[in-house]
Image (cartoon, grey):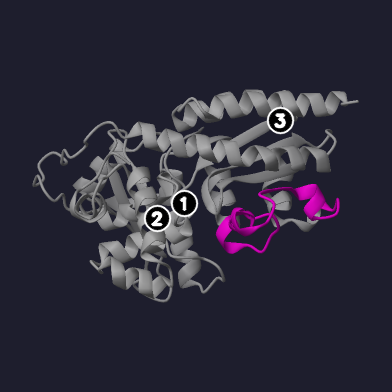
């Protein structure tokens, strides 16, 4: 006989799966998802992020019940401090959800994040999950309970891990349905095409020291993050922190670049680089470059959005190089008939009918419909 707990999990899972098939914008999806998850797994507060599937940098639209200082400390912890249950580790883990209590064997103070951030908030156990479909990550979340609450159970973690795949599909669908505008307008007073990059300088305290006119325009175009007093988008803060970690030689820091989308639907490429201080006692600074994304920057995202398999991605890259189909079949040790089947699947997923249309989609056109 099914237990009450299992009935609650099953009802919540079915409700969330239906919700994620509605094509809701990311923040609205997160807001509704939070309410439905509470019916199955109690928590005090929650934070939600959409992530760039290639770099795992945040995209605009952070939903977090915390102030600017704690957001900065959480980001610093992710890139600089040894700790358990990091989002980048979860992205590669077999199970995409884990609680701090289970990861530390009930010894929460073993976690730097708990000692320096969570305990001050009166939090107890903290659960993190990444919304992953296959190997592609579209977002992440953290759920927190109070110190007086019991920790998340293994059954809670198993349920939340199961929820990750439908939520990932919901985020992917929201990306696909959001690109119905061609946002090729340039910043005021700037040449029409291509728009020049914008540059802003961020100090080690995460304040903006200076910025160009174009950078000011792009920042104004980004969707707001929902955290108290957060003037600098979490995507910018994360890129700056990642650049610092890379310059400091931190393992697993990754390349501080990603793609973010403006409120008007235009994709920007973001890149961060550490600047050398003027002298031995100079203040550390990081430059953030924002510029319109080129088709090549968006091609991997397009393939992610349309759910191409690893073999289909491989064939797509070879097609874009202009290789004859006979050569591609020989290189991949498959028959021409099998290659033809793969090409039909690729064209169907990307809604093109020929190789020239495929090339135009991924290389020749400036896309805003992804």
Q: Residue furthest right?
A: 1
Q: Residues within 10 Å of mark 3 (few under 14, many from 20)?
A: few
Is residue 106 highlighted in magenta?
A: yes
Q: Over which residues does the magenta segment extend?
A: 78-107
In this rendering, is residue 295 above or below 192? below
Q: Is residue 67 visible?
A: no
Q: Earlier in the sequence, mark 3 or mark 1?
A: 3
Q: Which residue is mark 2?
A: 342
48 left or right, relative to 108: left
Q: CA distance from mark 1 to mark 2?
A: 24 Å
Q: CA distance from mark 3 to mark 2?
A: 47 Å
Q: Which residue is mark 1?
A: 53
Query: Where is residue 71 drawn, in percent x and y?
Result: 55, 44
Front in this rendered view, residue 310 or 223: 310
Number of dots carrying numbers: 3
Secondary structure beneath label 3: loop
Q: Which residue is mark 3?
A: 44
Q: Residues within 10 Å of mark 1 (few under 14, many from 20)?
A: many
Classify residue 240 by image quadrant: bottom left
Classify residue 339 by image quadrant: bottom left
Q: Earlier in the sequence, mark 1 or mark 2?
A: 1
Query: Where is residue 121 drawn, in percent x and y?
Result: 70, 38
Residue drawn at x 69%, y 51% is 95
Query: Where is residue 174 drawn, in percent x and y?
Result: 43, 33
Query: Where is residue 224 drawn, in percent x and y?
Result: 40, 34
Secondary structure beneath label 2: helix
307 left or right, relative to 190: right
Residue drawn at x 43%, y 73% is 333
Eye-nearest disc, 3 or 2: 2
Q: CA distance from mark 3 to mark 1?
A: 28 Å
Front in this rendered view, residue 337 or 297: 337
In this rendering, is residue 104 above or below 226? below
């Amino acid at each position: 006989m099914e237990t009450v707990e299992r009935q609650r999990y099953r009802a919540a899972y079915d409700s969330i799966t239906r919700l994620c098939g509605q094509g809701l914008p990311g923040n609205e999806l997160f807001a509704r998802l939070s309410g439905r998850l509470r019916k199955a797994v109690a928590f005090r507060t929650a934070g939600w992020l959409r992530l760039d599937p290639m770099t795992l940098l945040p995209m605009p639209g952070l939903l977090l019940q915390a102030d600017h200082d704690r957001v900065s400390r959480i980001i610093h912890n992710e890139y600089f401090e040894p700790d358990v249950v990091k989002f980048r580790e979860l992205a590669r883990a077999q199970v995409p959800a884990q609680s701090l209590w289970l990861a530390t064997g009930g010894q929460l103070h073993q976690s730097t994040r708990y000692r320096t951030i969570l305990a001050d908030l009166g939090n107890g156990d903290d659960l993190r999950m990444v919304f992953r479909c296959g190997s592609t990550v579209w977002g992440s979340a953290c759920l927190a309970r109070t110190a007086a609450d019991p920790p998340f159970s293994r059954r809670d973690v198993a349920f939340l891990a199961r929820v990750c795949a439908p939520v990932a599909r919901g985020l992917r669908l929201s990306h696909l349905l959001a690109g119905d505008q061609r946002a090729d307008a340039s910043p005021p007073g700037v040449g029409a095409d291509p728009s020049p990059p914008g540059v802003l300088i961020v100090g080690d305290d995460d304040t903006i020291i200076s910025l160009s006119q174009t950078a000011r325009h792009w920042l104004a175009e980004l969707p707001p993050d929902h955290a108290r007093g957060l003037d600098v988008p979490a995507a910018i803060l994360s890129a700056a922190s990642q650049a610092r970690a890379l310059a400091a030689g931190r393992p697993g820091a990754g390349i501080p670049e990603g793609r973010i989308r403006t409120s008007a639907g235009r994709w920007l490429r973001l890149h961060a680089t550490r600047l050398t201080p003027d002298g031995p006692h100079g203040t550390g600074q990081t430059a953030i470059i924002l510029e319109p994304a080129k088709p090549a920057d968006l091609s991997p995202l397009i393939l992610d959005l349309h759910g191409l398999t690893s073999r289909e991605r491989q064939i797509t890259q070879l097609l874009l190089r202009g290789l004859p189909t006979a050569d591609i079949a020989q290189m991949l040790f498959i028959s021409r008939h099998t290659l033809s089947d793969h090409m039909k699947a690729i064209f169907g997923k990307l809604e093109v009918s020929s190789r020239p249309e495929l090339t135009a989609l991924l290389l020749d056109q400036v896309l805003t419909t992804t």
